[in-house]
Amino acid sequence: MTRQGRSQLVLGIILILLGAWFVATKTIPSLGEFADTYFQGPFILMWIGAGLLVLGLLTGNPGMAVPAAIVAGVGGIIWYNTTYAADGQSAWAYMWTLIPGFVGIGSIISGLLGDNPRQNISRGLNSMVVSATLFLIFAAIFGGLNILGKYGPAILLILLGLWLLGRSVWKSFRGGGADA
């Protein structure tokens, strides 16, 4: 079966399952209550992300894990802000730094599914480290995160610089001095 034929087959199955879901939620009241809770607001983005991942798996395109992780992650950020943030907006000042981490998660999943494993897993881990460091720095500056005291952002910047420097030196020694 061609790639286009496979995509149309998967899309047809997804549409049939969605139609069956809508019929079931109208027929079974408890299922409708579940749908009212978990198919509103930010949960819709998380479901769309899961759907993108399934679509990528069914069509043999593991690269779909990256947009799936981004969409689901943004849904998670919105859910966190509406559920746990005191004023609903306080965490937005630094939560955007998690998006490169979502790209990293998608790259790792893509690599684990066989799409250039070594390169995707390496890039994914690098994105997650940078994202986590930026998150901690901006959370310390804007969110009052006080893990490392008043010097927290400076310490984290130094650690990130050391990590990048060490990574660069490691690549140059491993590559025999050539730019890697």
Image (spheres, rainbow, N blue to C red):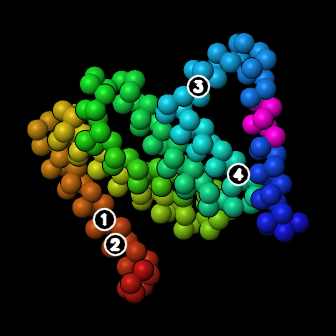
* Image position of 59 with respect to 153: above or below: below
Disc nearer the start of the sequence (3/4): 3
The three-letter amino acid code for the residue at tag 1 is Leu
In magenta, the rendered stretch is: 16-21
Q: Residue at x 44, y 77 (%)?
A: 174
**50 is higher (above) or lower (below) than 179:** above
Near mark 2 (Cα within 10 A), the count class, few <14, some 14-19 or many ≥20, is some
Q: Relative to residue 74, is residue 112 drawn left or right?
A: right
**Which residue is outermost to the top?**
29
- Could you tell me the amino acid type at mark 3? Tyr
Q: First in sequence: mark 3 or mark 2?
A: 3
Q: Which mark is residue 55?
A: 4
Mark 3 vs mark 2, CA separation in Å = 45 Å
Report the mark closest to the observer, 1 or 4. Answer: 4
Sequence-earlier tag: 2 or 4: 4
Q: Residue at x 33, y 73 (%)?
A: 169
Q: Which mark is residue 168?
A: 2
**Mark closer to the chain start, 1 or 4:** 4
Badges 2 and 1: C-beta atoms under 8 Å apart? yes
What residue does disc 3 label?
38
The majority secondary structure of the magenta stretch comes to: helix
Earlier-in-chain disc, 3 versus 1: 3
Q: Find the distance from the CA under tag 1 to the CA under tag 4.
A: 35 Å
The circle drawn on residue 118 is: none
**In the image, is residue 177 part of the stretch drawn in magenta?**
no
Question: Label 3 vs label 1: CA separation?
Answer: 41 Å
Q: Secondary structure at mark 4?
A: helix
